[in-house]
Amino acid sequence: MVKKAPKKPAKLPTKLPKSALPTMRCFLACDYAGRVAAVNGEKTSLQGVFNVVWVENVPAAYGQFFLFIQLYGGKVKSALKIIATNGSGKKVMELITSTAIPFEPNETREVMAKVPILPVEEMSDIQFVASINGQKIGWPLLLEISKNSN
């Protein structure tokens, strides 16, 4: 038996605990992330979304790219921290937003973090984990490191 969908989507409760964390909707790596003009204001523009980093040899330094994270809801004002580790568990990078982000119930926040250089020390995936106040949010972003055979 198929149930009918409710006519109105359910809203999240607005009375959240004082430090409720937002939920992650999206976590991507891309060549560029920014805001651009649109008919009704601005929109988010992501260009060159990828999940594989190609290198000739290791160690290597992968050039500038962006991490895009979309978060929803919550009730906290805090910086967002992103830590990247390689397959051996070694931390290769840490990013922290320069200002505290105010998260509110039923609101979406977008974080576009510029990664100047990603050190690639071994041929293993690099995992990015986002956290707020020391608590992980969402899921990790995994970038595969592959040898460029050209």
Image (spheres, rainbow, N blue to C red):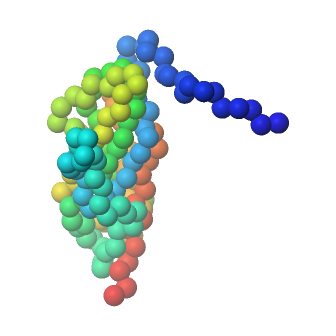
Left or right, 107 with respect to 116, comes to right
Q: What residue do we see at 38% from left, 36% from top?
A: 71
- Image coordinates for residue 3, horizontal then vertical, percent: 74, 32
Q: Nearer the viewer, residue 7 or 50?
A: 7
Q: Nearer the viewer, residue 41 or 100?
A: 41
- Image coordinates for residue 34, horizontal then vertical, percent: 22, 50
Furthest toward the bottom, the residue is 150
Q: Nearer the viewer, residue 69 or 94?
A: 69
Q: Quadrant of residue 134?
A: top left
Q: What residue do we see at 21% from left, 50% from top?
A: 36
Could you tell me which quadrant the C terminus lies in? bottom left
Q: What residue do we see at 23% from left, 43% from top?
A: 42
Furthest toward the right, the residue is 1
Tell me if residue 34 can be seen.
yes
Furthest toward the front, the residue is 39
- Image coordinates for residue 84, horizontal then vertical, percent: 33, 51
**On screen, 89 above or below 108?**
below
Could you tell me which quadrant the N terminus lies in? top right
Q: What residue do we see at 44% from left, 12% from top?
A: 15
Left or right, 97 with respect to 105, comes to left
Left or right, 79 with respect to 143, comes to left
**On screen, 133 above or below 149?**
above
Q: Quadrant of residue 7?
A: top right
- Image coordinates for residue 26, horizontal then vertical, percent: 41, 45
Tell me if residue 112 can be seen.
no
